Image (cartoon, rainbow, N blue to C red):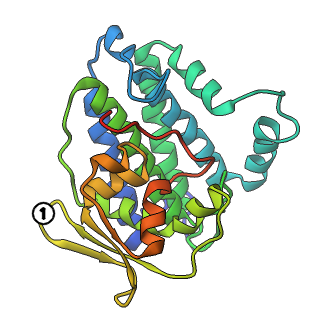
């Protein structure tokens, strides 16, 4: 008989690797904000109206939702209706409110909250059944996809923080997760702009941080996107404008996709202006 007090072993395989990469990506951003004075937390980032504190508060807020989705699907649905559905106050913007309210806390309190929430997400996703789709703001996702989404958001908001601090982060092999997510959300990006999902597949041929090539997608696809993996990830997270990136598109679907690509749920973002 299994001892109920025995801790659940950490997941292995794809999910285990993703969670370790999520932990590592979070640690990079943690290193950027640890030790920042109060004025550093108040520094503006490229996201209009958001300081570094807003960026970390948003990640903490989203981690709260992620843990709830993984632990209690019904509770997530009820909370979603209350905050985003018919029960929410008219004119409310829960995302902005979450960032604003979190950013109002003392930096040490906010940092502690984010750290605790990250650990809760890792534990909740580790314990979630691998084949069960978890509810979300966009399409439901399995734990592995949810972990990928959290890694993408952590990296993207980390880019905003790095830009605010004038820091250049070293690209890593973890970008491959974001590249995969960027391609998987191609149809969603078209739908977000009121366009039908393309029937033609797209292939990515990206230069990895180590100089190798990441080929993602059907080998016989006529629509192909090429360029640095870092640039593609900056594009699909809307952290750089298309004109400022060394990406090339071949084929009508790839060409139409790049200006509207987004790897995140929700409405299309404003993105960045050329040269920003």
Q: Residue at x 56, y 60 (%)?
A: 189
Q: Judge whether 106 appears above or below 88 on screen.
A: above
Q: Quadrant of the N terminus?
A: bottom right
Marker count (numbered): 1
Q: Is residue 9 visible?
A: no
The answer to whether residue 35 is left or right of residue 79 is left
Q: Can residue 129 be seen in this view?
A: yes
Q: Decide which of 9, 45 is in the foreground and name it.
A: 45
Q: Judge whether 46 appears above or below 141 on screen.
A: above
Q: Decide which of 63, 270 is in the foreground and name it.
A: 270
Q: Residue 35 is drawn in which quadrant? A: top left
Q: Decide which of 79, 39 is in the foreground and name it.
A: 39
- How many neighbours does mark 1 have within 10 angstroms: few (below 14), some (14-19), or many (20 or more)? few
Q: Judge whether 8 appears above or below 114 on screen.
A: below
Q: Quadrant of the C terminus?
A: top left
Q: Residue at x 54, y 63 (%)?
A: 143
Q: Is mark 1 on a helix, strand or loop?
A: loop
The answer to whether residue 107 is left or right of residue 96 is left
The percent position of residue 271, horizontal first and vertical second, equals: 46, 41
Name, please, the residue furthest toward the left: 211
Residue that mark 1 sits on: 210
The percent position of residue 179, horizontal first and vertical second, equals: 36, 63
Q: Judge whether 45 appears above or below 148 on screen.
A: above
The percent position of residue 70, horizontal first and vertical second, equals: 62, 55
The answer to whether residue 33 is left or right of residue 110 is left
Name, please, the residue furthest toward the right: 86
Q: Decide which of 244, 187 is in the foreground and name it.
A: 244
The percent position of residue 108, horizontal first and vertical second, equals: 40, 17
Q: Residue 213 is drawn in which quadrant? A: bottom left
């Amino acid at each position: 008989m299994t001892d109920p007090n025995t801790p659940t072993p950490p997941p292995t395989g794809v999910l285990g690797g993703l969670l370790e990469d999520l932990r590592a990506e979070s640690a990079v951003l943690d290193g950027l904000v640890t030790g920042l004075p109060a004025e550093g937390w108040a520094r503006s980032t490229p996201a209009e109206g958001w300081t570094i504190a807003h960026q970390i508060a948003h990640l903490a807020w989203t981690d709260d939702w992620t843990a709830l989705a993984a632990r209690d699907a019904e509770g997530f649905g009820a909370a979603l209706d209350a905050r985003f559905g018919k029960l929410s106050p008219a004119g409310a913007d829960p995302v902005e409110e979450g960032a604003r309210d979190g950013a109002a806390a003392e930096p040490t309190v906010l940092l502690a909250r984010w750290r605790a929430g990250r650990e809760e997400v890792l534990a909740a996703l580790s314990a979630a059944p691998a084949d069960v789709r978890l509810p979300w703001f966009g399409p439901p996702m399995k734990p592995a996809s949810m972990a990928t989404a959290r890694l993408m958001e952590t990296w993207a908001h980390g880019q905003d923080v790095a830009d605010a601090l004038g820091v250049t982060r070293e690209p890593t092999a973890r970008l491959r997760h974001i590249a995969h997510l960027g391609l998987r959300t191609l149809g969603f990006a078209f739908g977000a702009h009121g366009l039908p999902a393309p029937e033609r597949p797209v292939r990515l041929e990206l230069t990895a941080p180590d100089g190798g090539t990441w080929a993602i997608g059907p080998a016989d696809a006529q629509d192909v996107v090429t360029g640095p993996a870092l640039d593609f990830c900056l594009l699909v997270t809307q952290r750089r404008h298309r004109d400022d990136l060394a990406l090339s598109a071949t084929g009508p679907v790839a060409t139409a996709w790049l200006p509207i690509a987004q790897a995140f749920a929700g409405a299309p973002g404003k993105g960045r202006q050329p040269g920003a």
